[in-house]
Amino acid sequence: MTAPHQLRLPAEPPPPLRGHLPFADVPGASDPIEVTSRWLTRGGRPWFPVSGEFHFTRCPAGQWEEELLKMKAGGVTVVAAYVIWIHHEETEGDLRFDGDRDLRRFAELCARHGLDLIPRIGPWVHAEVRNGGLPDWVLARTDAPRTDDPAYLAPVSRWYAALAEQLRGLDRGHGGPVVAVQIENELYDQPDHLLTLKRTAQEAGLAAPLWTSTAWGGVQLPPDELLPLYGGYPETFWTEADGGWPDTCRKHFFFTHQRDDEGIGADLRPTTVRGGDPQALADRFPWATCELGGGMAVAYHRRPRVDAADIGALALTKIGCGSVWQGYYMFHGGTNPRGRTSFLQESHATGYPNDLPLLTYDFQAPLGEYGQYRPSYDELRLQHLLLADFGQLIAPMRSVLPERLPTGQDDRETLRWAVRGDGRSGFLFVNNHQPHEPLPDHTDVSFTVDFPDAPPLTLPATPVTVRRGAYFCWPLRLDLGGLRLEWATAQVVCVLDGAGGGAEDSGDADAVRRVLVLAAIDGMTPELALDARSVKAVRAPSGDLTTVGDRLLVTGLRPGTDALVEVDTADGRRVDLLVLDAATARTAYRGPAWGADRLVLGDGGVVFDTHRDEVRLHSRSPEPSFAVLPAPPATPVAAAGTVKETADGVFTRYTLVGAAEGPGGTERAERTLPVALVRAPGEAPPTATGVLGRAGAPADEHYDTVAAEYHVPVPDDLPPGSLLRVHWTGDTGRAYVGDRLVADQFYSGRVWDLAVDRLRTEGDPGTEGLRLKILPLPAGAPVHIPERTGDAPLPARIDRVEWLTVHTLPFRAG
C-alpha cells in the first residue's frame, strides 16, 4: 500500500467581509441577495447559483419555453443571455423586439418557470457576432467605440433606455427575475468607461441587486462597482491553427486558486496583464464564473472538438478550486438570425481574427443548436443535483490543496485533488481527466484529511484505483439529519425527503424517510462508512457490514436501482442510502412531479412543467420508459398509448406501449434517406488568408463551381421533432431548400444535424428536397481539424443521411 495523500484543513478563517460592496437588493425582498467577500447569500443563506447562457435571438421563439425547461431540468437556476444590439437594431431607428427578438417575453418565461435572468447588455458583447454586436451604423458614428466618446455614448444611452423599457416591471422590486446585469464584455483596461456604462444603465431605469463584469485578462475594474466573473474553457477556436492545445486550457484541469484565464479572447487584446490587481479582487469578491466552457465554437482555421468528459471534468474541478457560482457558456447552442443587409457572424470581413459559420452557433453545447441532448448535459446535471442540495454547505467551505502538488502543467503523474471543507466536514474532489493528454491510472489510493475541529480521516478503508479519465466528489463527515456518513467512495447526487425504501421496513410506516442518492464511480466498488454511534440498525441488499472502532463499513455493494442501504438512526429516524451505478445515475432528474419532489430516471430528456401539471419525456425510443422514486399515488396517464407499470429495484418503472400512432407521429421502418450525387466535386480551391494571416472561409462562388452537390428528398411524413443526421467529410458544407441557405457547418469530425421543423419554415423540403453542397479541403491547408492526419486533404463526401425523431410525450397524474 502506498502512503496516503495528505491534506490539512486550516483553522476556520475570520468571517468574510459583509456590507463592503455597493450591491443592494430591493427593500423588503423576501429572499434578499447579498455578496460577501467569499460567497453569495440569498434569504440569509449561502447561495450557489448555476447559470447557463442561452441566446434567445438565436432560437425560434416558439421553442423558448421547452428549451428553458430543459435547462432548468439540467440544474440551471439562472439564465444568462446576451442582448445583442445588432440583432435588434441592424438599421438605425428600426428597433425590433418582436418575434424571436422579444426580450420581454423571454424574461417573462424565465419568471414563469422560476428561473432568474441575467441580461448581458453590452453594448459590445463579442458572442462571435458581427462587430461584437455593435451595429454598423454605430461604428460609422465614432472612431472611438467602447470609450466615453460622446458620439458613442449617445446611441448607447438610447439602447440602454430601450432595454429598460422592455424589462420594466421585471426587476426584483416587482417580483421579476432579473438578479444581475452584465456591463460590456472583455473590456480589460478602461475602468472609467465601465463605470460610465453602469451609471448610464441605472439612469435608464435598469435595476438589479448585482452588477457584473467579465474579469479575465488582467482586468482593471472600477473599485467595488462590478462583481468580477471568471471563466475557463477546455479548448479554443481563437488560437492559432498550429498552436496545439493551449496551456491556458490545460491549467483548468488542475486544482489551483488562480482565478484568471488570460487566454480567453486573447486574439482581441494583448495577453500581458494590464495592471489589474487579482489579489485585491480575490480579497473582496467571491470566486464566481460566467464562462466555464459548456462547449466550444469552431472557426474556419481552428475547429476544436470538445467531449462530455472535458466539460464535466473542468466544471467539477472548478468547484473543488473554490467556485461559488458555476456559469456556463454556452449551455444551449443556437442559429444566427439573418441580417437584412449582411450575415451577422464574426468574420475576417469585419476585421475580426476568425471566420465563423454564417448561421450555426451550435457551440457543441450540452443542449445543441436544435435542442439536442448531448452527453455533457448529463455530466453537468449530475453535478448540479449535488449543488441544489448541498451548495449551501459547499459555498462557505474553503478550498484547500494537498501537501503534494503537481510540479507544473506538464506533470501528469501526480494525482490531482483538493478538499472543500470547514472545521468538521467537507467534500473531496479528484480529477484524473484532461483532453488530448491522457492521465495514468493511480493504484492503491487513499487520503488523509486533518480537520481542525475533529479527528483526522483516512479513507477509504480499502485503497482504490483511480482510473484514467475519472473525476468525482466524495462526501466527508456528511450530516444527514440523524445519520453521519463518514465517507462514501461514491458521488453524492441528491437527497429525497419522504421517499420510501425497499420491501423490508422495520420502522414506523408514517415516519419521514430521507434517501441520500449516490452515484458509483466506474471501476470503483462503493464503500460507505457510517458513524456507528448514529446507527441503531442497518439493512443492506448485498455486500458486507463490518464494525471498525466507531465506524460501520458497508462494502461489496452492487450499485443499481436496488442498492438501497436502510438505516434506522440512533435517534429514531430513518435515513436510506441508494447507490446507483454510474450509467443509471446519468439518467437521473429531480423535480416536482405529480404533487411531490421525485427522482426520475429517463431514457431521454425529462422536463417538469408545474404550470401544466405534467412531466414530459423527450425520447427516441418507440416504447419510452422512465422510473420514479417515490412512486406517484397512481400510474401516470399519457396522451396516447398505454402505460405499463413494473418494479425496478426501489423505483417504479412506467413504459409507454402502443403509442406509435400517437402524438409523436407515425413510426417509419427505414432510418436512412436516399442521397443522390448531383455534381461531383472539383479541385479544392486554394486556402485564402485574412486577419492575422489565418485561413479564411472559402468564397461563396466556390459552392457553385467546386463543391460536391447532393440531393436528399425529405419525406412529408417525418414526424415533428425529426432531425436529419448527415455523416460527411470535407471542408465546409451548406444546406439549401431551393435556393435559400438554411444551414451551414465547418467539418470538425462530428456529424451534422439539421432540424426538419426548421427546414419546413424555410420552404418546402418535401417538394424540393434538401440540397447539400460540400467543399473539399486542399492538402496543406493551415486548418486544425482533430481527425485530420497532418496536412492531408479531405475529400468532399456524404456517406449517408439518417433521420431520427425525438418524441415529446406528456405524462399527467393518474
Image (tube, grey):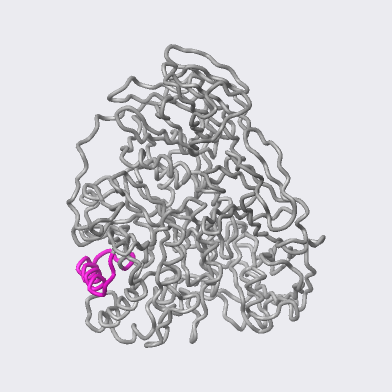
When asked about the image quadrant of residue 669, the answer is bottom right
When asked about the image quadrant of residue 580, the answer is top right
Q: Position of residue 811 (x, y in %)?
A: 64, 53
Q: Position of residue 809 (x, y in %)?
A: 66, 57
Report the residue that reaches farthest toward the front.
510
From this view, report whether residue 389 is shown above or below residue 80: above
Asked if residue 190 is among those painted magenta in the image, a careful observer would answer yes
Asked if residue 45 lies left or right of residue 788, the reply is left
Q: Residue at the location (51% across, 44% down)?
A: 597
The residue range painted magenta reads: 184-207
Asked if residue 312 lies left or right of residue 207, the reply is right
Q: Residue at the location (43% across, 81% down)?
A: 96
Q: What is the number of callouts on the image?
A: 0
Q: Is residue 16 visible?
A: yes
**Residue in front for this viewpoint, 83 or 459:** 83
Q: Position of residue 691 (x, y in %)?
A: 43, 74
Report the residue that reaches farthest toward the right.
669
**Residue in front for this viewpoint, 282 or 388:** 388
From this view, report whether residue 54 is shown above or below residue 538: below
From this view, report whether residue 443 is shown above or below residue 312: above
Asked if residue 36 lies left or right of residue 779, the reply is left
